[in-house]
Image: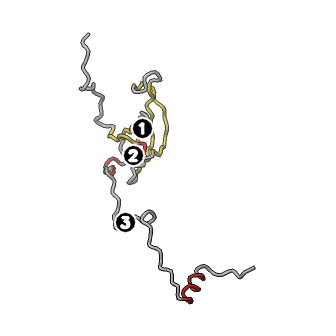
Amino acid sequence: MGERQPPGAEVGALEQKGQVRPPSPPHRALFPLQDKEKKKKESILDLSKYIDKTIRVKFQGGREASGILKGFDPLLNLVLDGTIEYMRDPDDQYKLTEDTRQLGLVVCRGTSVVLICPQDGMEAIPNPFIQQQDA
């Protein structure tokens, strides 16, 4: 069997013969614009004012929960403590019932978060865009 050469030895052999292979350019797919890497990504929302306050979160798929915001990151992953999930009507997925479920400490994935709002001062109002039917 042939002798095992250290990595890069074949390049050295090419240089001795006068056949130098130019270094391959960095691929854009592997190394996106480096200027963007230097910039710190900022979150769209400033949730720091809601730390240790109760917030309500709506998720893709229609689930709703509320809890005390303990932490978050730029991707809007949330940590909620004392979380309560509001159960939906099995017949009408868009209608919430009075039933709730205690979840405790929850990590909410930011990609599934649709809406975040403070619990204080929130109240349900009738939809102004649908015509009310007079009975």
- Asked which secondary structure carries label 3, the reply is loop
Tell me which amino acid carries mark 2: Leu
Real-space Cα distance between discs 2 and 1? 19 Å
- Asked which secondary structure carries label 2, the reply is strand
For the N terminus, give its image quadrant.
Answer: bottom right
Question: Residue 109, position in %: x, y?
Answer: 45, 46
Between residues 80 and 37, which one lies in front from this camera angle? 37
Instruction: Tell me the crowding category of disc 3: few under 14, some 14 to 19, or many 20 or more residues within 10 angstroms, Cα based.
Output: few
Tell me which amino acid carries mark 1: Gln
Between residues 49 and 9, which one lies in front from this camera angle? 9
Real-space Cα distance between discs 1 and 3? 32 Å
| Disc number for residue 33 | 3
The answer to which quarter of the image holds residue 7 is bottom right
| Disc number for residue 41 | none
Question: Residue 12, position in %: x, y?
Answer: 57, 85
Mark 3 vs 2, N-terminal side: 3
Tell me which amino acid carries mark 3: Leu
Residue sitting at 44 percent across and 70 percent down? 26
Q: Circle 1 is placed at which residue position?
A: 60
Q: Circle 2 is placed at which residue position?
A: 69
Is 90 placed above or below 65 here?
Answer: above
The answer to whether the residues at label 2 and label 1 have Cβ atoms under 8 Å apart is: no
Question: Residue 123, position in %: x, y?
Answer: 29, 30
The answer to which quarter of the image holds residue 124 is top left
Real-space Cα distance between discs 3 and 2? 34 Å
